[in-house]
Amino acid sequence: MTNSTAILGSTGSIGTQAIEVAQMHGIRVTALAANTRVDELVKQARQLRPELLCIADESRYPALKEAAAGLGCRLLAGMDGLCEIAQHQSTELLLNSVVGMVGLLPTLTAIEANKPIALANKETLVAGGALVMKAAAERSLPIYPIDSEHSAIFQCLQGNKRSQLKKIILTASGGPFFGKTKADLKEITVEQALNHPNWSMGNKITIDSATLMNKGLEFIEARWLFDLAPDQIEIVVHRQSVLHSAVVYQDDSVIGQMGVPDMKIPIQYALLYPDRLPCPTKPLSLTDYGTLTFAKPDFDTFDCLTACIRASETGGSAPVVANGANEEAVAAFLARKIPFLRIGELVHSALEKLPVKPLTCYEDVAAADRAAREFVREAIAADA
Ligand code: MG
């Protein structure tokens, strides 16, 4: 297990739970970074006394300076600050739980500084999977997935031969709109889309769960993490979120990982790997659940999922485009500028209209991301 960790995205849902787990097991928190929430960040710093404190939104730096005066932390801001934390000397492991493609550069920076990563930022792998996995393999650095499904798969791979893996079963809760048709989803409001049945998460990922974009991103994430062909991933809707995913071996044995839907379990596995110690969560009672159900996903209604699978098969910049278009479209939906179903349409049309390019360096990724966002912004402006 790790002795010290830096947490990017510390005021978010994963970040606050990671702090709880770290405190329970005496893991020192060396640095904290938040996007915009200065007050929460400083409150965490007062309690944990990290060496470095960073606010990603540079316009809030003066507020951070004022609020953190006398704490004795070195204060940082912006992408430079995130990257400084990523390579900070007294940190053993970087826990990256920022939201969006902004997490990629700090991940690459940490790998270059020989730090293992606990990764909750799926966009890092969706956009930069080729770069991240290559850099980590060159240095034999582990990437511990914190996404619950990928943590489950990672756990199911322990003690078995990777070469004897047949496929994985990636489970999906189905989100709040399982069983609905496109016609039902026309008038969906932001509040309805933010009302997830099982998981309590940040806004962006909750919308991604409602569109099933989240499962599409996880499909791409799984391909990179576990080096899988597209036909080695079966997506299964499992409404209760108890089986977090499973692995099928050549002998058709299916090994799954179960637990209550609580992110503290995958967070702790990443921080304590390979140890399994008591976790601040509820135990799973299978008899309380009684029934677990499994169904095929509805690829027609949830076309973000289809878009991601297609983008992953296309390769090159296509997954970056799908992700960038989605980030921009979700922000517009949350700002009540576009209707719910427009998110999927925009992701599809960005993939159709923008050229597929090879990704050889970070700048290639950033350029494809910028092009996708610009495409979506222009499309939304044309809608109005
Ligand atoms: Mg997940």
Image: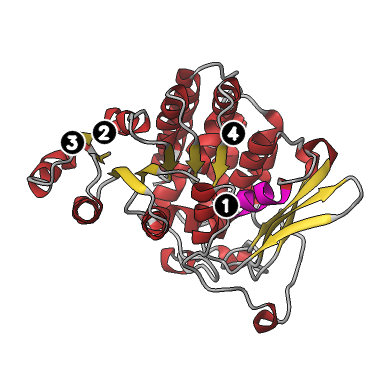
Instruction: Give the Cα separation between the discs numbered 2 and 1.
Output: 35 Å
Q: Nearer the viewer, mark 2 or mark 1?
A: 1
Q: Amino acid at mark 2?
A: Gly
Q: Does 286 appear in magenta?
A: no
Determine which residue is flagged by label 2: 78
The x, y position of residue 62, in whole percent, is 10, 40
Q: Nearer the viewer, mark 4 or mark 3?
A: 3
**Residue drawn where x is 51% and y is 17% of the image:** 361
The x, y position of residue 305, in whole percent, is 65, 48
Sequence order check, earlier mark of 2 and 1 = 2
Between 137 and 64, which is closer to the camera in this rendering?
137
Sequence order check, earlier mark of 2 and 4 = 2
* Tag 2–tag 1 contact (CB < 8 Å): no
The x, y position of residue 345, in whole percent, is 57, 46
- Label 4 within 8 A of ligand 1 by Cβ: no
Instruction: Give the Cα separation between the discs numbered 4 and 3.
Output: 36 Å
Determine which residue is flagged by label 1: 275
Label placed on residue 330: none
Sequence order check, earlier mark of 3 and 1 = 3
Sequence order check, earlier mark of 1 and 4 = 1
Q: Secondary structure at mark 1?
A: loop
Label placed on residue 319: 4
Instruction: Give the Cα separation between the discs numbered 2 and 3.
Output: 14 Å
* Tag 2–tag 3 contact (CB < 8 Å): no
Residue range of the region highlighted in magenta in the rendering: 146-156
Quarter of the figure with residue 56: top left
Q: Amino acid at mark 3?
A: Arg
Judge whether 240 appears above or below 228 on screen: below
Q: Secondary structure at mark 4?
A: helix
Sequence order check, earlier mark of 4 and 3 = 3
